[in-house]
Image (spheres, grey):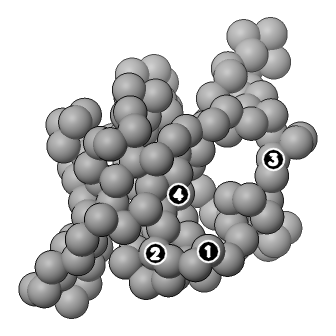
Amino acid sequence: MSLNLPTLGVRSDLLRLGLTAERTLEVPPGDPGSPAGWYLHSPTPGETGPAVLLGHVNAVGGGPGVFADLRRLQAGDAVEVLREDGSTAVFTVQRAEQYAKDEFPTAAVYGNTDGPELRLITCDGFDRNSGEFRDNYVVYATLATSSAG
């Protein structure tokens, strides 16, 4: 699978991500240029439910990560996912929200939906004192079209 964000000029293969030993969401490796990843316990993009894609906002050692410009996405922008069967699921951005990590609305982000949806998630709110990100940034999108491969 791969991801295309035409508005941002971003293309990325999608890694398969699971859960860590601590039962938290695995994130893509921290290598510079690391691709985004699909959380494999979420629906395949284009199937009913919220498909979850994760990516870094910055690269190790500085520089932009694959989701560095996620905040530039606006309602109405397209998000394309080339699926393993060769079809393309095209989603339309609805909105985006910033959440404190200790107040992350798990059910709202990962909970069941009536139709195919997409969540793009990255870190946000860098704290220079701690060197950590305090927040997550989540883009919500709904399926617009799906084409056969």
Q: In this view, does 87 lie to the left or right of 55?
A: left
**Picture quadrant of residue 23:** bottom right
CA distance separating discs 3 and 2: 22 Å
Q: In this view, does 119 lie above or below 62?
A: below
Q: Which residue in the protein does label 3 denote?
A: 104
Q: Which amino acid does label 3 sit on?
A: Phe
Label 3 with label 4: CB-CB less than 8 Å = no
Residue 81 appears in the figure: no
State the residue lying farthest toward the right: 102
Residue situated in front as seen by the camera: 89 or 84: 89
| Residue closest to the eye, 125 or 31 | 125
Q: Viewer-nearest of labels 3 and 1?
A: 1
Q: Which residue is drawn at 56% across and 70% down?
A: 50
Q: Whole-percent x and y of residue 71? A: 46, 28
Label 4: which secondary element: strand
Front position among marks 3 and 2: 2
Residue shown at 67%/33% (left/top)?
A: 98
Q: Which amino acid does label 4 sit on?
A: Arg
* Quarter holding residue 144: bottom left
Horizontal side, residue 53 vs residue 24: left or right:
left
Q: How far apart are marks 4 and 2 (CA)?
A: 10 Å
Judging by the rendered image, the residue that carries numbered circle 4 is 119
Q: Quadrant of the C terminus?
A: bottom left
Mark 3 lies on a secondary structure that is: loop
Mark 4, Cα crowd under 10 Å, few <14 / some 14-19 / many 20+, is many
Q: Residue 102 carries which label?
A: none
| Mark 3 / mark 2, whichever is N-terminal | 3
Where is residue 147 drawn, in percent x and y? 15, 79
Is residue 57 among the parts visible in the rendering?
yes
